[in-house]
């Protein structure tokens, strides 16, 4: 192995360096200047995000345990953008609520560790690396979910997440062991050649799938989602719903499209059933929610159901549409969570009812929220429409017309509850509306980036073509 | 030559629009006026630079003007069928850039004076910029779909500007009327576009207009009700163009559109947007000409000729000066259409095409000038009606002179611009269709008559008792008048046949003296009659009214077209068709939907208990889910 091949690991190495720098900062920066750690971390991560866009080559390192190519690289960049926006949106919360308890550094270290786990997970070339990445990406988040130690709900969220995820990774590991048993290897490239459609491999695949389905919060593996989102700090709920879900979708897609391609006749039916269940359950629960965070939790479950439509297509179009959708979903959902974050930080209010009359007092925030919800609902011309449209195209191109029809029914249902929030903000009057407040620079920047993404991504077609060309790698 | 910088010409007004729109309340009115004018000035300079580069430096190769295209694919459907976004540079698009730039710039400058003190000053300039952006995009479009997008954008800006005085109910209903009528026509346009896309496999103008291309050669492939599908498509596209250009019978929105501020009428409803229909036919001219030997062109010619005559007759009897100008616009647009309709393709045969574009150019200048003069007059006397005016020449000398120049130009008196362009149109009509020629000559006489009727009515005749003494408008308003007047004088001497022709090769055009003499004679006759009737107060006009009796009444009520439309829509469509459908919709369609909705909420209530909050239940569900999946996919669903 040459020194230059480390360059293809530069995402991992740089992020590790940033984590260490933050740790060193924690040690050497004096008590009264601790606030600067937030600026430092955001600045460093911003540079990391930008350098990520330097071109890369397709490589395989450590005897095939670690691999990267244009698509994986692109996806890491997508995650970086998401985390960067998230950091911008969390900065005020960190400075006002967390730094005073003197535990801001841990936040960055845990968050970056989790992201590092995701890098390894999506770059993995064998199941060992995959599993290590999966665990590294989950465990720090459980700690982060329980971050507000004075808040009982937050502790509850942490416990629920760690228990559920322990179960999920156990089941997943069990499945991996069965795949190993039938194929005799844990390397993806070997398994592709060895795998055959036997009962044991199918069992292994289903168990393995359940573990990832837990992370994507597909029905019936989704129950933890709402409770954890509600209890966890908003940044973490946001991280779970966007970054963590995106990474899991991506690796699931790679594995299904490459390693488990011979089992496609099984998993396409399984995904069909789960897609329908997830869309309906997610939407039906979202209808009833009063709390914004729970509301967004179920909305994100339903969105995961839509993503499965791209997965079921199983071709290049499917890959491209999934990545494109996830990218747009990151911007839309982060915009929504960002507004919830801003309002919660200023007023502590988190219920839909509290948002009544928001447009009169805070028109800009309401507009951002409206755009985000429109994008999530898929109303043209914002980006979300194109994301959904392409997903449906992908499923329809493989002849899944009934599934597309059911998805359209679900879009209609989802429109109803997204508009409930819009109605509350714009049409309802309130005796006690959220007073006007001004956001700080970081939050504004964070929201601005999401808005630009929502408005521009859908119309900027070269991006989709670019993703489509990259997608050929997995098919 | 790389013309890609042209993208800036539409983009600058777009940026201005966004700036003024977003910071609406925070910008001082004076600043927003300057920003608007400066933005458009930049676009104008770029347009002139482009025109110079294109017509005199790079445009020609082997004696033929080339078409330059810069585009990117926006949305792909099949290998060939795609929606592109880009700019197309050819003689007519460059000419339109010049027309739009000059008129829009003048209107921007003029509006700084005209709209002074208005509450929505910034908003007004924002809308003007939006319109300029859309219009530039329309003329530069590279394909049918792009032109359609900007077509609708100009429609929206027109809607916004007609309804600018939104506290006035008449303005609001006029805006709605304009939007609905043109939208209705655009439905035809859209269907036409889709048919073209389906049968030719492309939206691209270059591919469609290539006389040796598949699009035109394969026209006979399918026929529908006696005509080829492409002819039907072209007729449908023409319906869209007729809606925008206020051709009979889709003209009813244009007179009402005069509810907008007068600068808007000058810009949108006289010089630029309303010629979009003419431009559309010109843009697709090779297609119109070659598909089925130009059958669709005959329709264009007759609709144009009839509209010209119809509108000119109505214009004679109107008393609101802006409505006279509106009908005059419709009549002149009819001229342009009929010229396209009688045109050939090669060399001198394409005289009609050239004349149409020439007239479009000249008309834009003198009609914008007429409207701006009318605005200046209205500004002074605060009324639109002839009865409130008279003898204004003493108070408003500049407006008087410039209005006179414009009126002479539109009446076709040499050497003003209208004389040359109108003469070419009449020559083209004479060579192809005598009936249309005679209509054209008669309309020329009527035009001269009604134009001088309002000229004498405003500036001569009996002096009305004014509450405030009228005064000349400020320099910001008179400067554009003078510029446009100058252009109306010299515009006719531009050798258009060298630059803008159907086959892009250019030819030598000469005056046809006998025909020119006839046209001028008829025009002078019209002016003479108007002189006799209206220069000094007399009862000749009343006598004529009595002589024509009921015919006068029909004409002044615009042949009751509004009433006919209202009867058809309200009495027949709304009561007989829409009402039963609405009932059905409310009872069954809505009922079903409400039922489904209730069912959904009910289901969601029922399954609420699944989410218990206990982590052991979640674990159970997890394991149960895995077990069920395993059972189903190993033992039951095995294929």
Image: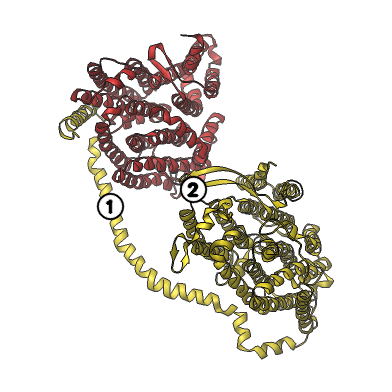
Chain colours: A red, B yellow
In the rendered image, the quadrant that contains the C terminus of chain B is top left
- Image disc number at residue B284: none
The residue nearer to you, when weighing A125 against B355, is B355
Do labels 2 and 1 touch, CB within 8 Å? no
Label 1: state its secondary structure: helix
Q: Nearer the viewer, mark 2 or mark 1?
A: 2
In the rendered image, the quadrant that contains the N terminus of chain B is top right
Q: Position of residue B372 (x, y in %)?
A: 73, 64
Above/below status of A334 relative to B104: above
Q: Position of residue B146 (x, y in %)?
A: 55, 51
CA neighbours of label 2 inside 10 A, class few (<14), some (14 to 19), many (20+):
some
Q: Residue at x 49, y 41 (%)?
A: A458
Quarter of the view holding residue B275: bottom right
State how far apart marks 2 and 1 are (Cα): 40 Å
Residue matched to label 1 = B596
The residue nearer to you, when weighing B591 against B245, is B245
The residue nearer to you, when weighing A377 against B62, is B62
Q: Work out whether disc 2 and disc 1 sit on a shared chain.
A: yes
Q: Residue at x 52, y 55 (%)?
A: B215
Q: Is residue B502 visible?
A: yes
Residue matched to label 2 = B81
Q: Residue at x 78, y 57 (%)?
A: B476
Label 2: state its secondary structure: loop
Q: Is residue A22 visible?
A: no
Quarter of the view holding residue A107: top left
Badge 1 sits on which subunit?
B
Q: Position of residue A462 (x, y in %)?
A: 52, 37
Quarter of the view holding residue A115: top left
Above/below status of A456 relative to B266: above
Residue that lies at the very extreme toward the left in this rendered image: B635
């Amino acid at each position: 192995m040459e020194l230059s091949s480390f360059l293809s690991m530069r995402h991992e190495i740089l992020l590790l360096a940033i984590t260490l720098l933050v740790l060193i900062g924690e040690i050497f920066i004096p008590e009264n200047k601790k606030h600067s750690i937030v600026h430092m971390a955001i600045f460093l991560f911003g540079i990391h995000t930008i350098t990520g866009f330097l071109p890369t080559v397709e490589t395989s390192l450590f005897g095939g345990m670690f691999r990267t190519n244009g698509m994986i690289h692109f996806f890491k960049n997508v995650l970086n953008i998401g985390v960067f926006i998230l950091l911008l949106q969390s900065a005020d919360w960190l400075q006002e609520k967390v730094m005073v308890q003197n535990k801001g550094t841990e936040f960055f270290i845990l968050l970056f560790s989790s992201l590092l786990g995701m890098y390894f997970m999506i770059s993995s070339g064998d199941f060992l690396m995959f599993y290590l990445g999966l665990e590294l990406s989950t465990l720090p988040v459980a700690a982060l979910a329980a971050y507000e130690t004075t808040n009982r709900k937050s502790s509850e969220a942490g416990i629920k997440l760690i228990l559920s995820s322990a179960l999920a990774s156990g089941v997943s590991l069990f499945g991996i062991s069965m795949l190993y048993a039938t194929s005799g290897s844990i390397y993806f490239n070997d398994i592709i050649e060895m795998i055959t459609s036997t009962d044991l491999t199918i069992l292994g695949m289903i168990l393995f799938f359940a573990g990832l389905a837990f992370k994507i919060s597909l029905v019936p593996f989704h129950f933890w989602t709402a409770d954890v989102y509600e209890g966890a700090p908003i940044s973490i709920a946001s991280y779970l719903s966007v970054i963590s879900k995106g990474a899991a979708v991506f690796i699931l897609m790679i594995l299904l499209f490459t390693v488990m391609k011979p089992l496609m006749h099984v998993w396409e039916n399984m995904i069909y059933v789960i897609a329908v269940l997830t869309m309906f359950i997610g939407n039906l629960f979202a209808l009833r929610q009063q709390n914004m965070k729970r509301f967004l939790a179920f909305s994100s479950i339903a969105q995961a159901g839509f993503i499965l439509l791209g997965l079921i297509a199983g071709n290049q179009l499917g890959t491209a549409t999934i990545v494109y959708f996830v990218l747009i979903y990151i911007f839309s959902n982060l915009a929504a969570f960002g507004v919830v974050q801003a309002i919660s930080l200023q007023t502590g209010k988190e219920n839909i009812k509290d948002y009544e009359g928001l447009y009169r007092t805070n028109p800009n925030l309401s507009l951002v929220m409206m755009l985000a919800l429109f994008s999530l609902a898929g109303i043209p011309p914002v980006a979300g429409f194109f994301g959904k449209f392409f997903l449906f195209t992908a499923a329809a191109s493989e002849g899944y017309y009934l599934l597309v029809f059911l998805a359209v029914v679900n879009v209609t249902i989802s429109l109803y509850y997204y508009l409930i929030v819009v109605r509350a903000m714009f049409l309802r009057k309130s005796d006690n509306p959220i007073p006007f407040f001004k956001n700080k620079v970081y939050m504004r920047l964070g929201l601005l980036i999401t808005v630009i993404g929502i408005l521009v991504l859908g119309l900027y077609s070269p991006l989709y073509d670019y993703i489509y060309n990259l997608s050929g790698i997995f098919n | 030559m790389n013309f890609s910088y042209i993208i800036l010409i539409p983009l600058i007004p777009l940026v201005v629009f966004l700036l003024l729109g977003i910071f609406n309340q925070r910008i001082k009115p004076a600043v927003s006026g300057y920003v608007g004018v400066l933005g458009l000035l930049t676009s104008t300079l770029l347009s002139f630079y482009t025109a110079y580069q294109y017509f005199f430096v790079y445009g020609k190769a082997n004696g033929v003007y080339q078409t330059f295209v810069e585009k990117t694919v926006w949305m792909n459907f099949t290998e060939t069928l795609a929606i592109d976004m880009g700019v197309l540079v050819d003689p007519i698009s460059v000419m339109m850039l010049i027309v739009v730039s000059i008129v829009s710039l003048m209107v921007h400058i003029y509006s700084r004076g005209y709209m002074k003190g208005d509450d929505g000053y910034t908003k007004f300039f924002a809308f003007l910029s939006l319109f300029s952006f859309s219009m530039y995009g329309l003329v530069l479009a590279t394909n049918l779909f792009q032109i359609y997008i900007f077509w609708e954008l100009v429609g929206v800006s027109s809607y916004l500007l007609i309804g600018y005085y939104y506290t006035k109910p008449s303005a609001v209903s006029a805006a709605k009327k304009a939007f609905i009528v043109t939208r209705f026509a655009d439905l035809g346009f859209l269907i036409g576009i889709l048919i073209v896309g389906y049968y030719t496999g492309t939206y691209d103008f270059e591919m469609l207009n290539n006389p040796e291309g598949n699009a035109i050669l394969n026209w006979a492939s399918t026929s529908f009700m006696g005509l080829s599908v492409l002819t039907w498509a072209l007729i449908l596209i023409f319906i869209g163009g007729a809606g925008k250009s206020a051709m009979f019978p889709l003209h009813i929105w244009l007179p009402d559109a005069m509810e907008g501020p007068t600068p808007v009428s000058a810009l949108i409803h006289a010089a630029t947007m309303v010629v979009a229909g003419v431009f559309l036919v010109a843009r697709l001219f090779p297609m119109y000409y070659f598909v089925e030997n130009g059958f669709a062109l005959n329709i264009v010619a007759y609709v144009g000729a009839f509209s010209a005559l119809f509108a000119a007759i109505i214009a004679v009897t109107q008393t609101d000066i802006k409505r006279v100008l509106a009908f005059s616009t419709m009549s002149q647009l009819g001229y342009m259409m009929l010229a396209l309709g009688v045109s050939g393709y090669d060399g001198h045969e394409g005289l009609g095409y050239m004349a149409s574009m020439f007239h479009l150019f000249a008309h834009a200048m003198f009609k914008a000038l007429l409207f701006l003069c009318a605005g200046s007059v209205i500004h002074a006397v605060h009324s639109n009606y002839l009865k409130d005016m008279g003898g204004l020449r003493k108070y408003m000398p500049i407006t008087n002179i410039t209005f006179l120049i414009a009126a002479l130009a539109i009446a076709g008196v040499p050497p003003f611009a209208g004389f040359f362009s109108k003469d070419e149109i009449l020559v083209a009509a004479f060579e192809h269709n005598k009936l249309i020629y005679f209509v054209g000559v008669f309309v020329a006489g009527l035009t001269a008559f009604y134009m001088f009727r309002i000229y004498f009515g405003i500036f001569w005749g009996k002096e009305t008792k004014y509450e405030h003494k009228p005064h000349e408008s400020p320099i910001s308003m008179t400067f554009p008048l003078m510029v446009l007047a100058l252009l109306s004088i010299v515009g006719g001497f531009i050798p258009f046949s060298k630059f803008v022709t159907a086959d892009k090769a250019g030819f030598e055009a000469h005056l046809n003296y006998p025909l020119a003499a006839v046209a001028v004679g008829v025009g002078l006759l019209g002016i003479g009659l108007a002189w006799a009737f209206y220069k000094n107060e007399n009862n000749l006009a009343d006598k004529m009214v009595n002589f024509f009796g009921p015919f006068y009444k029909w004409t002044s009520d615009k042949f009751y077209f509004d009433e006919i439309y209202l009867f058809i829509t309200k009495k027949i469509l709304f009561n007989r068709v829409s009402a039963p459908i609405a009932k059905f919709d409310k009872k069954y369609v809505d009922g079903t939907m409400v039922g489904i909705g209730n069912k959904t909420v009910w289901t969601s209530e029922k399954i609420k208990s699944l989410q218990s909050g206990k982590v052991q239940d979640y674990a159970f569900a997890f394991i149960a889910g895995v077990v069920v999946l395993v059972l189903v996919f190993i033992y039951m669903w095995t294929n």
